[in-house]
Image: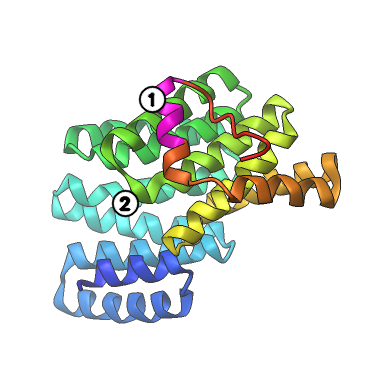
Amino acid sequence: MTFSETARAAFRRGDDDAVARLARDETERARAADDQPALVEALYMRSRLAIRAGDLDEAARIASAALAAAIKTGDRALEERPRHVLAGVTRMAGDLPRARVLYQESIELNEALGNADTVTSELHNLAFTELGLGERTAARERFATSRARIVAGDYRDFVPYAYVGAAALAVADGDLPRAARLLGLAERAFADLGQVPDPDDAAELAAVEAAVRDALGDDGLADGRAAGSRLDPWDTLALAVRDGAELAVPQSP
């Protein structure tokens, strides 16, 4: 496996120590060899680790260095990951109007590059930005578009994120029992893939959990979470997309 494949797989598993070691070694090797594409990837992984550690300033600094290295090559494809991180850091830092612009620019870049899968994931991130700005209708539309693209493209790794978005939207709608069930489904979807959520989505899940607990108590949270976890993530998502419906998770699966 390449550095990128190995490091990204370790990151998804939550093995931060392995990612840090791999990224440090790759950064040193790339700088010594003046291998700018490799340096971009190594810095990108380090910026993701900084986000997971909660150091948004450091994440932005490293991602900016990665973007500078990418621009130096003249290969626009190398700009994609650093721009994604910068948009995410901006969103997590609370500058939502700027994050909206950065995500839209990222979507345009990925459309030009033909990266249909990344367009799908960035639509999900843009939906969260719209939700944070209070634009619930726009968020609902973008989440729905992302879900449809996940199913059409058979993007199995994206399935958990569909439920993260749906759960956050359920909270915004005031439907806390449904949010609890969607939380359980999201957690099962991550477990089925052997992955942990990205830092921004982990923060969204934590916010959903807190809102549900405040409204329904520990027992209500546990019951809803258990109900959602008994559903099959892919089948539930595919059925909702086929029927053009919201992810209306039943109370008694």
Q: Which mark is residue 81?
A: 2
Residue 65 in the figure: left or right of residue 245: left
| Residue 11 image position (x, y, % from top left) | 42, 67
At 66% from the left and 39% from the top, the residue drawn is 252
Residue 204 visible in the displayed image: no
Rendered location of residue 157, percent (x, y): 37, 51
| Above or below, comparing residue 33 to residue 11 in the picture | below
Q: Looking at the image, tell me whether mark 2 or mark 1 is earlier in sequence order.
A: 2
- Determine which quarter of the picture holds residue 123: top left
Residue named by callout 1: 242
Residue 19 seen in the figure: yes
Question: From this viewpoint, which residue is outermost toward the front?
Answer: 253
Q: Is residue 251 left or right of residue 215?
A: left
Q: Which residues are magenta?
A: 237-244
As helix, strand or loop, the secondary structure at mark 1 comes to helix
Horizontal and vertical percent for residue 71? 22, 50
